[in-house]
Amino acid sequence: MQWKLGILLKKLWAILKVFKANMIVEKTINFLKKYLLRIQLNILKKVFFIFSLFYLFYLLIVNFKQLSFALYFDNFNLYFSFIFCFLSVLFNGLAWKNIIIWLGARCLNNDLIYFFIATNSLKYLPGNVWHFIERFNFLKKKTNKNIALYGTLIEPYLMLSVSLLISSIGVIFNPFLILLLSPTFFLNKRFIYFLLKILKSLKVNQYDFISSGNLNNELYSSIKCESFFPLRAFLIEVLFIGSKFLAFLFCLNIFLDIGQINISLMLIIFCMSWSIGLIVPAAPGGAGVFETFFLLFIGKAYPQNLMLETLIYFRVISTVADLLLSSPFIFKKYIFKN
């Protein structure tokens, strides 16, 4: 009798744990809806953008006499930087395709990669959402509305997770490590629905172009993850971040001897600054925020004028690379459509 009672109590406890977990999820989502969505994100973006402009303008004035404004077309580092910027866009598109496949989409070809590359240059338009609009509409025709929405939202989240994971190298013995690793923790089959609901709560209401409809009711039936963790997409995003960083290093090598640079420190600062620029895109393409926080983090460890020139070169090269790589697809889709 005691044995049967023990089994019954264990079953009741298991049911209570599941119920409690669901209650925690619902309470968390309600909290996000009630409080976090009240934050005026547009105002926050403007504050970051204005601060970034003032800080960069201040540094330009302080270091103006030391800036060379020279063109280094005869320097091989410039062309290697272009190559790695090109590669980063390709890796990003390939990662996006693998995210969509992981969410359960089938019969997808390389059109997804081409379309990602084509729409990548749209991030430089005012509003910084037009690339998301195009990808959402494109995926909606290829898959279903849920995969289209969450596949669009989770791609920058995956980039952020990888970037923060690399940044965590610098705080490996610090409690701050948990915060940097937490985004990766939710990227698995067990917590993905919880993550998707939070992303929807935080993002969909900001984007008027998405008519979310009855998404919550269809979520579990329309999204079926093919594995526990999106390992392939995650590793490709590592290649994306790595390519971006190498492009930056080649720019830096124009002005500083690479042998004098602490590569690991530079990688951590690069990833942290890039993550902040991704979270708070204050300007088209995230220009300004990344540069500001990079200069704040790097301090005076290296000559400020050389770091400024490096960041300017890197921004120009990455922007031109995006535009050049996507231009054939843009011309085909929008200009030579007929």
Image (tube, rainbow, N blue to C red):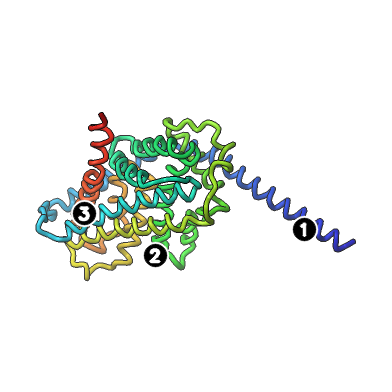
Residue under the point 50% across and 47% down:
104
Q: Are marks 2 and 3 in contact (CB under 8 Å)?
A: no
Real-space Cα distance between discs 2 and 3?
28 Å
Give the answer, above or below, for where 306 lies relative to 331: below
Answer with left or right where residue 143 lies relative to residue 331: right
Outermost residue toward the bottom? 259
- Between 31 and 193, the residue placed more toward the observer is 193
Tag count: 3
Secondary structure at badge 3 equals helix
How many other residues sit within 10 Å of disc 3, few (<14), some (14-19) or many (≥20)? many
User: Which residue is under mark 1?
Assistant: 10
Amino acid, disc 2: Gly
Dividing the picture into quadrants, the one containing residue 52 is top left
Please state which amino acid type lies under the numbered disc 3.
Phe
Can I make out residue 320 in this image? yes
Whether residue 51 is visible to the viewer of this picture, yes or no, is no
Q: Earlier in the sequence, mark 2 or mark 3?
A: 3
Q: Residue furthest front?
A: 107
Circle 1 — which element? Answer: helix
Label placed on residue 82: 3
Q: Which residue is mark 2?
A: 170
* Residue 234 point in image, percent of width and height: 42, 56
Q: Give residue 259's position: percent from left, percent from top.
A: 22, 70
